[in-house]
Image (cartoon, grey):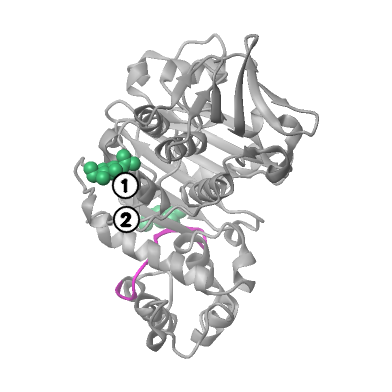
Amino acid sequence: MDEEYDVIVLGTGLKECILSGLLSVDGLKVLHMDKNDYYGGESTSLNLNQLWKRFRGDDKPPEHLGSSREYNVDMIPKFTMANGGLVRTLIHTNVTKYLNFKAVDGSYVYNKGKIHKVPATDVEALKSPLMGLFEKRRAQKFFVFVQDYEESDPKTHDGMDLMKVTTSELITKYGLDANTVDFIGHALALHRDDNYLGEPALDTVKRMKLYAESLARFQGGSPYIYPMYGLGELPQAFARLSAVYGGTYMLNKQECKVELDAEGKVFGVTSEGETAKCKKVVCDPSYLPDKVKKVGRVARAICIMSHPIPNTSDSHSVQVILPQKQLGRKSDMYLFCCSYSHNVAPKGKYIAFVSTEAETDEPEVELKPGIDLLGPVDEKFFDIYDRYEPTNKHDGDNCFISTSYDASTHFESTVEDVLAMYSKITGKVLDLTVDLSGASASGEESEA
Ligand SMILES: *[C@@H]1O[C@H](CO)[C@@H](O)[C@H](O)[C@H]1NC(C)=O
Ligand SMILES: *[C@@H]1O[C@H](CO)[C@@H](O)[C@H](O)[C@H]1NC(C)=O
């Protein structure tokens, strides 16, 4: 403890662990501490006994649910895009060697009261029952434009500058109706609200391409992959990376008080009466409550089931996005299901999550349309937590605080926050142009 560190990282949530790994690889001297005696912070995974302890107090889980240690229930469930930022970060850091990923079976969208497979290519658009005959043709043309679009090749731009043209203008050009725009924006481009319509179209086109290219990587029915044994494996894999590069880890460090000097600049962290000195602190919002503000609440139902989500072709792992408009809400709702096929539950059991940003004081009522799609459940738990964002100026205090995890069940926004924090901490942009072909995952268990 009585050494001087470049960076002290507080909390072993996924964001903090990725940063600790990246900063250690950069040659910085890193001390990583957690007030809890387990890895993962908010983004930990629980076995059945731990799940019961958290939500049911002294009760014991019933026998018929099977062995506690066969459960790995994520508190922040998320799938990762096969070609997305998290996978690139894993390859960039070689953390892939500590993990096994498996493709996710299905990607669906809720539309006019029904669950449909998300069409991602011109060929799938033509087959999709989501659209009528003429709309299919228009969507096909739009998908072909997106597939062919190359930022560096103006010949593919169809005379448009997508840094200037808004998504709304681009969609108008192809004459797509509001229903089509809804599933493209929310289930393919993974926007969480409708602000993207007024923003330059380039971002949405890139997101659609990421989806289609990720889908093409595997034989599976989705662009997503997920680690065997759950997300709890991820923070630990990055922690191992940090340790390989000289990072020091300490769990169960009570208090962890961030020390500021007279000018408000961080100079160390005190725990159990000892102060470790440092130049910068990286942490989750719980370690610096005076430097964050509450920006929302996430509501989540966690369900143990004995069957897959109905109408998803018996997918043993699946995401269903319920766009806000379909439910008359301001924020999307997400269904996420995984099972024994990813080793997160005993044979025959499925863990389903329904998540959304809470918009009322009755989040359990808000979640009902999503829960109703699950069919009968064996057990149901409700979780609700506040979301925080930093309010500090990091060039004044040298504190770098992550934002809380949002309700989405994919990693894209998580990775954006991590990469932005990395740039603020180091003044560098992380180069994630990696050789994706070096990594593979298939329907069978294999490395990503
Ligand atoms: C990853 O592995 C490659 C090849 O062995 C090596 O050159 C590179 O330095 C490694 N990167 C990290 C972050 O350990
Ligand atoms: C599920 O499939 C059944 C049978 O095709 C259909 O009647 C029902 O509307 C579907 N429900 C949803 C939510 O898609």
In the foreground, 235 or 249: 249
Q: Secondary structure at mark 1?
A: helix
Q: Position of residue 117 (x, y in %)?
A: 37, 60
Residue 332 in view of the camera: yes
Characterize the local packing of mark 2: few (<14), some (14-19) or many (20 or more) Cα atoms within 10 angstroms.
some
Residue at point 56% right, 84% down? 172
The span shown in magenta is 111-123
Q: What amino acid is labelled 2 in the image?
A: Val
Residue at point 41% right, 21% down? 47
Residue 41 lies in the magenta stretch: no
Where is residue 121, by image quadrant? bottom left
Residue at point 40% right, 76% down? 146
Q: Report the residue marked by disc 1.
A: 91
Q: Position of residue 174 (x, y in %)?
A: 49, 85
Ligand 1 is located in which of the four quadrants? top left
The answer to whether marks 2 and 1 mark residues whose Cβ atoms lie closer than 8 Å is yes
Query: Does 193 appear above or below 156?
Result: above
Where is residue 45, by image quadrant? top left
Query: Does 228 appear above or below 311?
Result: above
Q: Secondary structure at mark 2?
A: loop
- Give how far apart the Cα atoms at labels 2 and 1 are: 7 Å
In the foreground, 291 or 387: 291
Q: Position of residue 103 (x, y in %)?
A: 28, 47
Q: Position of residue 234 (x, y in %)?
A: 39, 34
Q: Report the residue marked by disc 2.
A: 434
Where is residue 157, by image quadrant? bottom left
In the foreground, 257 or 324: 257
* Label 2 CB less than 8 angstroms from ligand 1: no
